[in-house]
Amino acid sequence: MTGPVKITSKTEVEEFLSKYDDFLFDCDGVLWQGDVLLPKVKETLDLLRARGKRLIFVTNNSTKSRKAYTKKFSKLGIDVTAEEIFGSAYSAAVYLKKVVKFPADKKVLVLGESGIEEELASEGIQFVGGTDPTLRRDIEPEDYDKIVPDPSIGCVLSGLDLHLNYLKLSMALMNLQVPDTLFLATNIDSTYPTHGKLFPGAGTMCAPLVLASKRQPISLGKPSKAMMDCVKAKFEFEPTRTCMVGDRLDTDIRFGQDGDLGTLLVLTGVNKESDILAEDAEIVPMHYMTKLGDIFELLN
Ligand code: PLP
Ligand code: CA
């Protein structure tokens, strides 16, 4: 296998761009870091659009809906439509609606934030839990008898929940002990990089439930095939003419590889050059560059 190609010149950028019509972009670590736009990202996205490339933004962040994400883009000066965004909360909603054909009379028990609630609502799926303030409390002695499987719940959906507690985990576990209850996760990222540090990722939210129920959730985030199937169903692209751009090997680059897409790693997020040049590197992108904005800078 040939090693990853580092793109450092105008000719290499032109050659890279000529290979692809469609680009799937990871967001955090590629376009921005937290709330700070990375250099020449806007110029690069404008340049790609001007060349007729299709841009699709694929994020594992389930805390925001597509609509909320457009606000984030526009605050940072980038114009996108909700239709160009594919988040893991939306992915889970689409999976329930289109793949599982989740019954209209059943509800989803959500461990997560408003992004999941908004996307479930957009697909007409009923839910409980989520940001419900009455669940933000300690478990009380009288709760033990009251927490039982709820026959109206057909699915436990777990994402990053900033108010996760023993009460919600107990409700989820009761329902997961019913074999027919679906177990989904928006994403199972081990860590959530922010403010220059690693915080627990969405995968750590469902980990206690995996241990206790001895069940594994179906993940609807990168790098899962389920997410790729949902993205493909919506956008219909030719994999060999499509490139996944990301900052993380075990989510973004694996996602691209498993979908037979081209892959570009940028070094402005989780993984560094040493991770892909190491002899024992397991996941190696086809291409890499220092930052996404190099595309604009090298062409100008
Ligand atoms: N999960 C959460 C809760 C996040 O806030 C983020 C980044 O903001 C991510 C996952 C990773 O998102 P991405 O796939 O855009 O890197
Ligand atoms: Ca990222």
Image: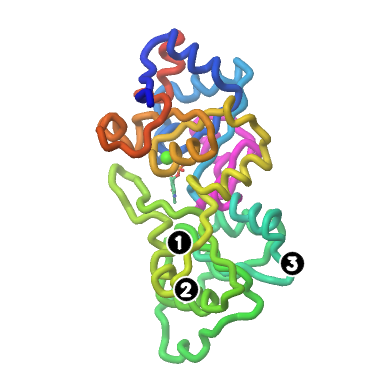
Residue 120, percent from left and from top: 64, 58
Residue 248 to residue 62: above or below: above
Query: Which is nearer the N-term, disc 3 or disc 1?
Result: 3
Q: First in sequence: mark 2 or mark 3?
A: 3
Residue for point 45% across, 39% down: 252
* Left or right, 200 with reference to 23: left
Q: Which residue is mark 1?
A: 161
Relative depth, front residue between 111 and 235: 235
Question: What kind of residue is marked 3?
Answer: Ala
Q: Residues within 10 Å of mark 3 (few under 14, many from 20)?
A: few
Q: Which residue is mark 3?
A: 104
Instruction: Look at the image and tell me in which quarter the C terminus lies.
Output: top left
Residue 263: mark in rendering: none
Name the residue nearer the viewer: 289 or 145. 289
Please report contact status of discs 2 and 3: CB closer than 8 Å, yes or no: no
The mark lying in front, picked from 2 and 3, is 3
Q: Position of residue 138 (x, y in %)?
A: 40, 79
Residue span colored magenta: 62-90
Q: What type is the residue that disc 1 sits on?
A: Asp
Measure how far apart labels 3 and 1 are at the Cα level.
Answer: 25 Å
Q: Position of residue 245 (x, y in %)?
A: 47, 31
Mark 1 and mark 2: span between their CA atoms?
10 Å
Q: Tell me if 1 is positioned left or right of 59 in this view.
A: left
